[in-house]
Image: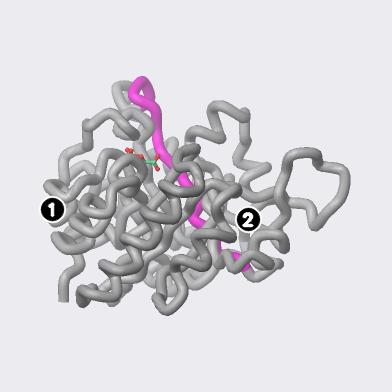
Amino acid sequence: MARKKLIAGNWKMNCLLEEGTQLAKGIAAQVKQNKFDCDFLICPPFTLLGFVKKCLRGTKIALGAQDVHFAEKGAHTGDISPLMLTDLGCSYAIIGHSERRVDHFESNELIQKKAVAAHKAGLNTVICIGETGAERDEGKTIKVCQDEIFGSVPDDATAKNTVIAYEPIWAIGTGKTPTAADVEEVHAAIRKALAKKLGKATANKMRILYGGSVKPSNAAELLALPDVDGALIGGASLKVEDFIGIAKNACSK
Ligand code: PEP
């Protein structure tokens, strides 16, 4: 089953206006110049979404937010609704990143609620899952990922409106990655869990990204694995040459 790869950048809480617009313009120029066999998504902080959208004009690079609230509007100080994101030109929202699960105590239930609201507003979601280092050491990786799939992915998830990102927490921003064999084993188990939850046809079409210290030098090996359908990239998405280098090494036509 051919799934088009997705190369997604999560800028996290980085970039002021000048740096962010330069980065977006640099990525846009490179995507226009080169021939890539993949989709692109960039997820800047909320403050830059409108500016980055303008920099992406004339490209097919999708714009995404790093989180979203489940309510349509109202008394939720500091939060951003799904419609506010579509209004700015977003087509994606990352949901359930481990930094939000940990720093903001986000539960599977809350993540699922956010995903339902996002889908209702026409947003696609990148739902993140992954184990801690301790869970990995205890041999619980697959169980943790399966539980997060069953708990966080809503019943309305389709291969179009949902992308899964497997991000081992111990690999995020550390320079460490699991072996290619470990990544493939976990991705295959995630696809099995998706099949149980959503049916085999949907699971076979749904993209499962790998995230955690992806860089140009390891992208080709990781993204060639049969169940790896792209990457969610943190640190390396903040430099044009690294982000584009990943696409060049893994998705050149
Ligand atoms: C992330 O936080 O989504 C991530 C994958 O970060 P990094 O690429 O820096 O490990």
Label 2 environment density (alpha carbons within 10 Å; few <14, some 14–19, many ≥20): many
Q: Position of residue 144 (x, y in %)?
A: 44, 36
Q: Which residue is mark 2?
A: 115
User: Please, what secondary structure does the residue beneath circle 2 have?
Assistant: helix
**What amino acid does circle 1 point to?**
Glu
Q: Which residue is found at the position 71% from the left and 60% from the top? A: 84
Q: Is residue 122 above or below residue 196?
A: below
Residue 117: image quadrant is bottom right
Viewer-nearest residue: 209 or 253: 253
Viewer-nearest residue: 55 or 210: 55
Q: Position of residue 113 (x, y in %)?
A: 69, 50
Q: Which residue is found at the position 54% from the left and 48% from the top? A: 66
User: Please, what secondary structure does the residue beneath circle 1 have?
Assistant: helix
**Residue 219 appears in the picture as rendered:** yes
Checking the image for residue 126, the label placed there is none
Q: Which residues are magenta?
A: 123-135
The quarter of the image holding the C terminus is bottom left
Q: Which residue is found at the position 14% from the left and 60% from the top? A: 249
Q: Which residue is mark 1?
A: 221
Q: Magenta includes 246?
A: no
Decide if residue 245 is on the left or right side of residue 173.
left
Decide if residue 198 is on the left or right side of residue 133.
right
- Locate ligand 1 by image quadrant: top left
Q: Magenta includes 129?
A: yes
The quarter of the image holding the N terminus is bottom left
Q: Disc 2 or 1, which lies upstream in sequence?
A: 2
**Residue 192 appears in the picture as rendered:** no
Q: Is residue 155 above or below residue 98?
A: below
Decide if residue 76 is on the left or right side of residue 64.
right
Q: Is residue 111 above or below residue 41?
A: above
**What amino acid does circle 2 point to?**
Ala
Label 1 environment density (alpha carbons within 10 Å; few <14, some 14–19, many ≥20): few
